[in-house]
């Protein structure tokens, strides 16, 4: 195609929604006020927008552990103003979800991309896996209403409990679930004691869902 055709074919499309996918790896946030996003995820913006780093959880979901987030954790930033903010994360696929009022989801800190400012949030660690493995698992706990964008390496798989998952491949789970830790000594013996695959997240019960991806993404060390 010639240059004009290339420009027209790849120009952003106008939409009516505040969170809209330009393609499967790029999110367009139509900003008129504020929105939250993963620090470092902004690739471009138009209009009058300012960005402020948030180094600690400020959401206020009761009952969840709140911790100050370091550079090795899950820093988020707030975009404020009017314009369009384009966000992406290392070419990962974006899954756009809408939470109704009171709906909750827990997302791996590596896999959160953006969420509307009215979504209540806190950042903490999953205590069960922290006790079993020195790495821990930093998660963002979200409660609707509002839109939430998460990322996956490839197409996700959504499972229902009971199920055990590799923490490094676990993207998110419904807020009704509280995973325990499971240790498989046979896996440790087979693939080496240095492998984290001997630890799994154990989701029990018969309700809710767990999202996994076909990729093992190393967790930030706590």
Image: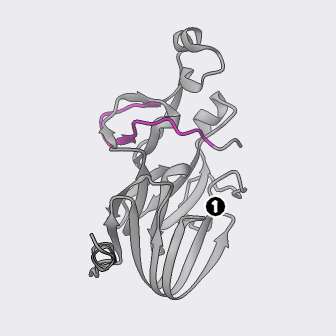
Q: Residue at x 60, y 41 (%)?
A: 219
For residue 35, say whether it is visible.
Answer: no
Front residue (pair 177, 70): 70
Spot occupied by residue 29 in the image (x, y as percentages of width and height)? 41, 76
Q: Is 210 a magenta residue?
A: yes
**Main secondary structure along the magenta-highlighted residues:** loop
Q: Residue at x 43, y 52 (%)?
A: 92
User: Relative to residue 31, is residue 100 drawn left or right?
Assistant: left
Q: Is 33 a magenta residue?
A: no
Question: Which residue position holds label 1?
Answer: 75
Front residue (pair 3, 37): 3
Q: Quadrant of residue 102?
A: bottom left
Quick check: 169 above or below 88? above
For the rendered model, the colour scheme is one colour
For residue 63, say whether it is visible.
Answer: yes
Q: Pick the quarter of the image with the C terminus.
A: top right
Span highlighted in magenta in the image:
202-219
Quick check: 42 above or below 162? below
User: Relative to residue 196, is residue 5 drawn left or right?
Assistant: left
Q: Quadrant of residue 135?
A: top right
Spot occupied by residue 127 in the image (x, y as percentages of width and height)? 61, 39
Spot occupied by residue 144 in the image (x, y as percentages of width and height)? 39, 65
Q: Residue at x 63, y 28 (%)?
A: 132
């Amino acid at each position: 195609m010639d240059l004009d055709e290339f420009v027209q074919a790849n120009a952003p499309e106008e939409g009516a929604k505040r969170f809209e996918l330009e393609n499967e790896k790029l999110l367009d946030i139509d900003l008129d006020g504020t929105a939250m996003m993963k620090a470092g995820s902004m690739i471009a913006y138009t209009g009058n927008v300012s960005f402020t780093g948030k180094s600690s959880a400020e959401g206020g979901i009761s009952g969840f552990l709140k911790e100050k987030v370091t550079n090795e954790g899950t820093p988020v930033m707030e975009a404020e103003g009017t314009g369009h903010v384009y966000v992406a994360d290392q070419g990962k696929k974006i899954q756009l979800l809408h939470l109704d009022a009171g709906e909750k989801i827990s997302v791996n800190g590596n896999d959160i991309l953006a969420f509307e400012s009215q979504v209540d949030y806190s950042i903490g660690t999953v205590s069960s896996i922290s006790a079993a493995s020195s790495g821990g698992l930093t998660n963002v706990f979200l409660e609707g209403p509002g839109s939430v964008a998460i990322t996956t390496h490839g197409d996700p798989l959504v499972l229902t409990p009971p199920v055990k998952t590799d923490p490094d491949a676990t993207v998110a789970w419904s807020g009704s679930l509280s995973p325990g830790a499971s240790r498989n000594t046979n896996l440790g013996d087979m693939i080496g004691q240095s492998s984290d695959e001997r630890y799994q997240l154990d989701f029990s019960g018969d309700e809710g869902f767990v999202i996994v991806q076909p990729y093992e993404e190393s967790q930030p060390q706590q």
